[in-house]
Amino acid sequence: MKKIFLLIMVAAILLSGCVDKTVKVVKIGDNISVDYIGSYEDGKVFDTSIESVAQANNLPPRDIYEPLNFTVGKKPSEVIEGFDEGVIGMKVGETRTLTIPPEKGYGLSKPELINVFPIVQVIPSTTEMPKEIEIPVSQFETVVGPGHKTGETVEIPDTNINLTILNITISDVSLSYKLKVGDVIWSKGAPWNETVIKIDNKNITTKPNLIKNEIIQFPDAPFNTTVVDITETNITLRNNPIPDTTITVPGIFGQMVNVRISFNETSVIMDQNPEVAGKTLIFNVTLLSIDK
């Protein structure tokens, strides 16, 4: 009886070993298909392959929701490093939670992409600019076009500002503002107009046309600004807080960039880093298939 029992046990062990050897697990080089839900440590879902999860978490809609397909360990990697490493050893039908630090996710946040300025700002109540200016010919022709001569009057596009051409050389153009005291200067997109209050031999002084408690709008800003106070020397502005938001604006080289805007008690924060940068990510991953 003991011999029979031992034989049964040995057979069971051998058979279980054979079954284990036939179960496919993810290895480097495998082509796999997964469903996933990506969230931050606070539980906020930021990405998913599952339409119902996206809708439940108010994510921006996609045209197509489908499983993520990629080759494990492929160089360059098709997914972030922590995701690539985290699926190794998974079996079809298995669900695994991956905790991915920034170093193996989307990288650290770059300080140079963050601009911070105070909610309350103080600016001078007057602006002084040279009466005459000199600029490169290439810049002049880019703004007002070629073919101009000394003595002509040109207008800066999208403004009512005229200048007289004093001299043109091979490299530079000398210009004089054609303004007088009392003129109101406007520019397309500017948050306010300016009035010329003084002109001397060298400079032109202007003053913003603002009144206390006026609401103004800076170009591309999703929030508005209140004129809190006006004195002989300064104008105090307060940028009015709004919920966190993201806007798209032209970048340095003309490409469009996303800027995340948030307020704290004292500052406005404008961050061009992706929202996922610098954050630990939690991925709930379900393996759907392995294609050797």
Image (spheres, rainbow, N blue to C red):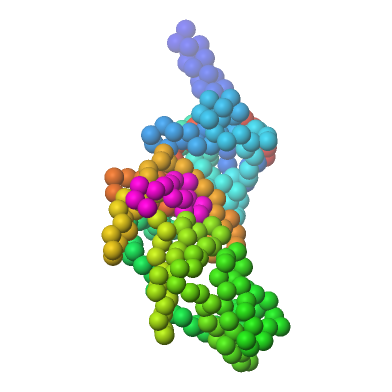
Q: Is residue 117 left or right of residue 135?
A: left
- Which sits in the foreground, 38 or 111? 111
Which residue is painted at 63% across and 45% down in the image? 71
Residue range (magenta): 211-224
Q: Is residue 63 left or right of residue 178?
A: right
Count of numbered tags? 0
Residue 96 in percent (x, y) is at: 49, 31
Which residue is painted at 58% across and 51% down in the image? 77
Confirm whether residue 196 shows in the render: yes
- Which sits in the foreground, 73 or 221? 221
Does the magenta-highlighted stretch encompass residue 207? no
Residue 263 in percent (x, y) is at: 36, 45
The vertical placement of 59 against 228, above or below, is above
Which residue is painted at 60% across and 48% down in the image? 78
Which residue is painted at 58% across and 42% down in the image? 27
Confirm whether residue 24 shows in the render: no
Residue 152 in percent (x, y) is at: 64, 83
- Which sits in the foreground, 118 or 40? 118
Quarter of the image for the C terminus: give it. top right
Specify the principal SS of the magenta part: loop
- Which sits in the foreground, 21 or 87? 87
